[in-house]
């Protein structure tokens, strides 16, 4: 049973456009929702994270939108750049579990 | 520099051989993790350890073994019982005080 569903699998966006990646979860015990960015051949790195007590968090060009009632959260990348081309993973963790459950990833390509 | 190191970066193994992947961290983190990454599958948890001399199975532990004799080290052994070991292996760690998991650069294992 996949606890975190991520879509789309791949995404092509023109430079300067908005990239949107969506995730849905089932476990209502999740209370921490990070997004990781991974470049080819490298380990993932934390991009931005949110907790369910807020509906939105913004850091630079990256924004997480969180909808607790719908059990969905999304990553928005404004003014997308070719350097943003990478694979993005959403994840979720339950309080005190020390375990992240990852989505299957979205490969983003930003074309000039 | 603080961080997580994994060695080797590339590893080739013949069928039927056991192989050990190294993971070392100097972040003074209590918890350490091993993930397996396959194309289109996201990150799947193999084993994790929250404290020295203790570890728990993740979602795909069959065919793998670990040890945690020192806080900074969490080696993973891929045994001959693992039917499809060719993959990208990622080690991660985190502190108790923070949710963020920090990832190493990964080891790509290929079975010949």
Image (cartoon, coloured by chain):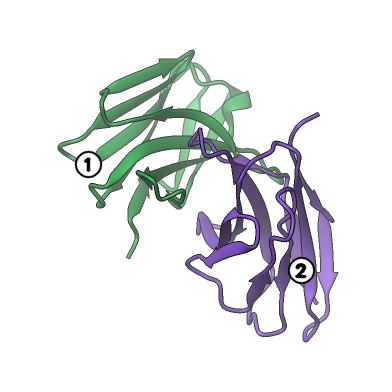
In this rendering, position of residue A11 left or right of residue A85: left
**Chain letter matching colour purple:** B
Q: Residue at x 32, y 65 (%)?
A: A1
* Residue A45 horizontal/vertical position (percent): 60, 35
In this rendering, position of residue A103 left or right of residue B62: left
* Residue B55 horizontal/vertical position (percent): 58, 63
What secondary structure is found at the residue carrying circle 1?
Answer: loop
Q: Residue at x 25, y 26 (%)?
A: A53
Residue A88 higher or lower than A100, as above or below: above
Q: Quadrant of the N terminus of chain B?
A: top right
Q: Residue at x 40, y 50 (%)?
A: A97
Q: Nearer the viewer, mark 2 or mark 1?
A: 1
Q: Which residue is mark 2?
A: B110
Q: Quadrant of the C terminus of chain B?
A: bottom right
* Residue A35 horizontal/vertical position (percent): 46, 35
* Residue A107 horizontal/vertical position (percent): 52, 43
User: Given the image, what chain letter belongs to the residue carrying mark 2?
Assistant: B
- Examine the image and state in which quarter residue A111 appears: top right
Q: Which of B94/B43 is in front?
A: B94
- Examine the image and state in which quarter residue A54 appears: top left
**Chain letter matching colour green:** A
What secondary structure is found at the residue carrying circle 2?
Answer: strand
């Amino acid at each position: 049973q996949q606890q975190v569903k991520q879509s789309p699998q791949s995404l092509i966006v023109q430079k300067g456009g908005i990239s949107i990646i969506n995730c849905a979860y089932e476990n209502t015990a999740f209370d921490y929702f990070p997004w990781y960015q991974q470049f080819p051949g490298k380990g993932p790195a934390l991009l931005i994270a949110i907790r369910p007590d807020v509906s939105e968090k913004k850091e630079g060009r990256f924004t997480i939108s969180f909808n607790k009632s719908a059990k969905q959260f999304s990553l928005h990348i404004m003014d997308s750049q070719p350097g943003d081309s990478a694979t993005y993973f959403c994840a979720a963790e339950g309080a005190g579990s020390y375990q992240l459950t990852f989505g299957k990833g979205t490969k983003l390509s930003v074309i000039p | 520099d603080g961080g997580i190191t994994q060695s080797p970066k590339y590893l080739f193994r013949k069928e039927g051989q056991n192989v050990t992947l190294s993971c070392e961290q100097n972040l003074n983190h209590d918890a350490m993790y091993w993930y397996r990454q396959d194309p289109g599958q996201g990150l799947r948890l193999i084993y994790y350890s929250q404290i020295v001399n203790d570890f728990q199975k993740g979602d795909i532990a069959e065919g793998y073994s670990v040890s945690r004799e020192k806080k900074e080290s969490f080696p993973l052994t891929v045994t001959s019982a693992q039917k499809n070991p060719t993959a990208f292996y990622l080690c991660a760690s985190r502190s108790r005080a923070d949710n963020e998991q920090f990832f190493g650069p990964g080891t790509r294992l290929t079975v010949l």
